[in-house]
Amino acid sequence: MQVKETQNEGLKRGYEFTLPAADLAAQVEAKLKEAQPEVEIKGFRKGKVPMAMLKKQFGQRILGDAMQEAIDAALRGHLETSGDRPALQPKVEMVNGETWKEGDDVVVTVSYEALPAIPEADLSGVELERLVVAASDEQVTEALENLAKNAQSFEDRKKGTKAKDGDQLVIDFKGMVDGEAFEGGTAEDYPLVLGSGSFIPGFEDQLVGAKAGEEVKVEVKFPEDYGHPTLKGKDAIFETTVKAVKAPKPAELDDELAKKFGADDLEALKTQIRERLEAEFKGASRQILKRALLDKLDGLVKFDLPESLVEAEAAQIAHQLWHEENPEDHGHNHGEIEPTEEHKSLAERRVRLGLLLAEIGQKAEITVSDQEMTQAVLRQARQYPGQERAFFEFIQQNPQAQQQLRAPIFEDKVVDHIVEGAKVADKSVTKEELEKAIEALDTL
């Protein structure tokens, strides 16, 4: 195989590989001889099929395999010799593909962008501030009261009492659009808590003040973004019968409540709530610490970025943001989404930090264990109830999906590694101050 360099500008590389016809013919001959002892063709004993017959029968397929193997081997050898690490899969094209015939040399062009050499990052001077929030007794009590509210029961109000927000109504209703009942618009003995927002806007408001035994004609308009396409923006009338008006009765803050939530007693439940709150605060604090670290790393070293990686990342960012702004469109038939300069700038930051963290992690010999991957797959699978097995099989068969799960785990482990060696000062703050810091992340 002959290799000729055709491009070497910045990170862009180009080569021309030439596989001589004689070498290719020798490979085909060797493969046919290797297979000959096991080949059976009608009219010939096993292993006695003439080479000319074998070549006529299998030559073209083996020739194609030999060409691909030779090109793959040449590319592997070139990368090992040069030390290049392609940013994306190298582009391989056959120069004389349309006119090539057996007996001609095979000429292919290979082009790619090499990953840059990452300068040594001096992490010794990294200084960070970690926000620390302790769960207060008031916060624990508030969370406990919310649990009691969720565990509340309802009891009948006095006959003739008007319903108000927070009350539970037991209703029968029949919905009609253009004078006709529609699918899913009818129910009996439905428990509806006024103010819960569980029905379309305006429905619950018109039941405030209703009494048990009354019939109410509720007139509403389905939202334009309603999930059922035939009901979007439609005017509807619900013939509603109020069968009962019930007042909320919060659960008592006692050991019985604690047992409903799996704790031995009320004090144990309070301890669990405090630990959960502080775990949430710690998680939020880590987000802020990680952003501060990434900001410092972003300006720590400079190196060229592969344009192909930046363009791919910018396109992904633009696509993701478009779907966030258009949540009703779950498909991909939305035409091309052109990345903005802001998308490209963010992509450059992500690529630069990704390459830097990968380099730091590699030098620190950081890896993602099989157990960590299994846990990640299990967490992700919970988002697909009833389809867990299909999700597991998809992950097993899809290396790209595995990498998408592995990448954030690896990044977090590298971040933890850097933080361990950095100068970190703890700063006690309030829950409100922590929340403001989290909100500020979205505006940076």
Image (cartoon, grey):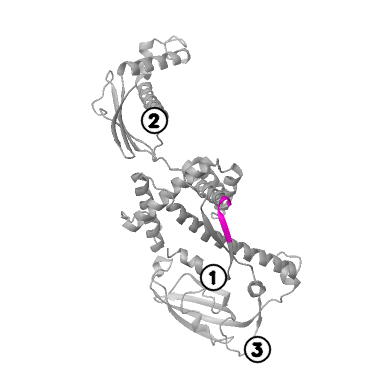
Per the model, the C-alpha gap separating discs 3 and 1 is 46 Å
Give the distance between the C-alpha atoms of the residues marked 1 and 2, in whole angstroms: 52 Å
Asked whether, in this view, residue 436 is left or right of residue 234, the answer is right
Q: What residue type is labelled 1?
A: Glu
Callout 2–callout 3 Cβ contact below 8 Å = no
Q: Disc 3 designates what residue?
A: 158
Q: Residue lying farthest front?
A: 125
Nearer to us in this view, 75 or 423: 423
Count of residue discs: 3
| C-beta proximity under 8 Å, tags 3 and 1 | no
Which residue appears farthest toward the left when viewing the image?
A: 99
**At label 3, which amino acid type do we have?**
Lys
Residues 109 and 427: in front is 427
Q: Does residue 371 appear in the picture of this structure?
A: yes
SS for callout 2: helix
Q: Residue 195: x percent and y percent? A: 54, 79
